[in-house]
Image (cartoon, rainbow, N blue to C red):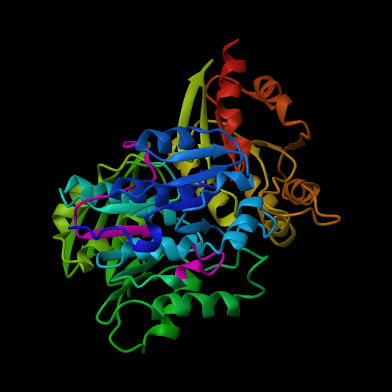
Amino acid sequence: MAPGIPAAMERPHFIGIGGAGMSGIAKILTQRGAKVAGSDSKESATAEALRALGATVHIGHAAGHLADDATCVVVSSAIRDDNPELVRAGELSIPVVHRSDALASLMRGLRSIAVAGTHGKTTTTSMLAVALTELGLDPSYAIGGDLAGPGTNATHGEGAIFVAEADESDRSFQKYDPEVAIVLNVELDHHANYASMDEIYDSFETFTGKIVPDGTLVVSADQSGAVELTRRVRDLSALKVVTYGESETADVRVHKITPRGLTSEVTVVLKGKYLTFTVSVPGRHYALNAVAALAAGVALGIPAHNLASALGKYTGVKRRLQLKGEAAGVQVIDSYAHHPTEMTADLEAMRGAATDARILVVFQPHLFSRTQELGTEMGQALALADASVVLDIYPAREDPVPGITSTLIIDAAQAAGAEVTAVHDKATVPEVIAGMAKPGDLVLTMGAGDVTDLGPQILDHLSS
């Protein structure tokens, strides 16, 4: 039932094909029969998975990697103008397509759900993908993280539904025309691209304005930014607005969230009826993500009780409070949290799930611009841990900003009464944590950079 391959996508070349968003699109195109090629900076499990599907993946960036007969070159906002493959594309007059345009072309002709928000996009998109698959609807999906069960971030399904994570960071979510859009929250982030909350609201308003006529906006009734967005878009013609949350005014109202160790039991009131279901990951914010997914599925016409039961099959996404293992009585958990709101939510979830455990955090700040704007709040969030190790800033796509270092976070954390240790050599972290951890402790590796690599190393050190 799914559409075929757009002509421009018959022989695409992806620069940075191993990235979370890029690899998903490449996987779907390969599964649809396109001749996919691309390059990435280093070998990875993602590169191997793409090769197993039939894609050609080069390691390193070089002009010679781009085939003369490529129908387009797909890039993300992270690709710089001097990339040799991008320069070669210009010399060959090969069209350059942004990642968001490529994804939008794959969604056309399908009933699409686009999941947006400053936090929670990956989890909510994943919950929908798992639930719809469980119900036999065989959806296509593109997610910013690998599902714990299938172990992939994207797939081509034969069903009529396409679920996609919609990225606001570079305004690329404005390219989509969803039947249902979810807005989980609206906060100031991505400071290199947005100078103010007004710019953020304008961007989200443009996104909601692209919902198809008679489509539905599912939006939080609790989070202040989402409430303000709702106020701004309520009068859009032919747009149905469905609010969800703990607010008494919510259309899908959360009656109760009951923690059950590493799971939660959620009861909602939907159209005057009570509905209870299980969310198989800990924390109030994940429970609310599941309610957003429920509301979106119902907006597509899926029976609420069927969808609620299927949502219980979701078991998590890699890097979203993912248990990496246990050694010497210490559990090591990986968290992708890199914004203060996310950090607070994950730490509170761990507190609720393991009330007697001591929580140790290895935090790697992500981006100089984010640290400059939110470093104080990051430090305050770390005060929720019993002790923290803070690494140097992971730059990702950014150049250093003079005077902006992890010290900003450490000073704020210590001012809030937190026990914090600065570690500049990442290789020494396993030894440092092994010296701090005791049986019964939880260790969280936290951040959006390569701090995730430390989990197995910490476990090895604890075992030795």
Residue shown at 24% from the left, 81% from the top: 214
Residue 410 belongs to magenta span = no
Query: The magenta stretch spans which residues?
Result: 147-173
Instruction: Say which quadrant the C terminus sits in.
Output: top right
- 294 left or right of 125 in image: left
Q: Position of residue 7 (x, y in %)?
A: 35, 62
**In the visual, does 359 lie left or right of 405?**
left
Q: For residue 211, say whether it is visible.
A: yes
Residue 227 point in image, percent of width and height: 44, 76
Q: Position of residue 147 (x, y in %)?
A: 37, 41
Identify which residue, 266 or 325, lies in the foreground: 325
Q: Say whether residue 348 is left or right of residue 130.
A: right
Image quadrant holding the N terminus, namely bottom left
Q: Looking at this view, is 13 or 69 the one in front?
A: 69
Residue 111 in percent (x, y) is at 24, 66
241, 330: nearer the viewer: 241
User: At 25% across and 44% down in the image, what residue appears?
Assistant: 312
- Could you tell me which residue is drawn at 46 percent across and 79 percent down? 206
The number of discs equals 0
388 on left or right of 16:
right
Question: Residue 269 falls in which quadrant of the image?
Answer: bottom left
Residue 222 higher or lower than 232, as above or below? above
* Above or below, comparing residue 239 to residue 368 in the picture: below
Q: Quick check: is 153 in the magenta stretch? A: yes
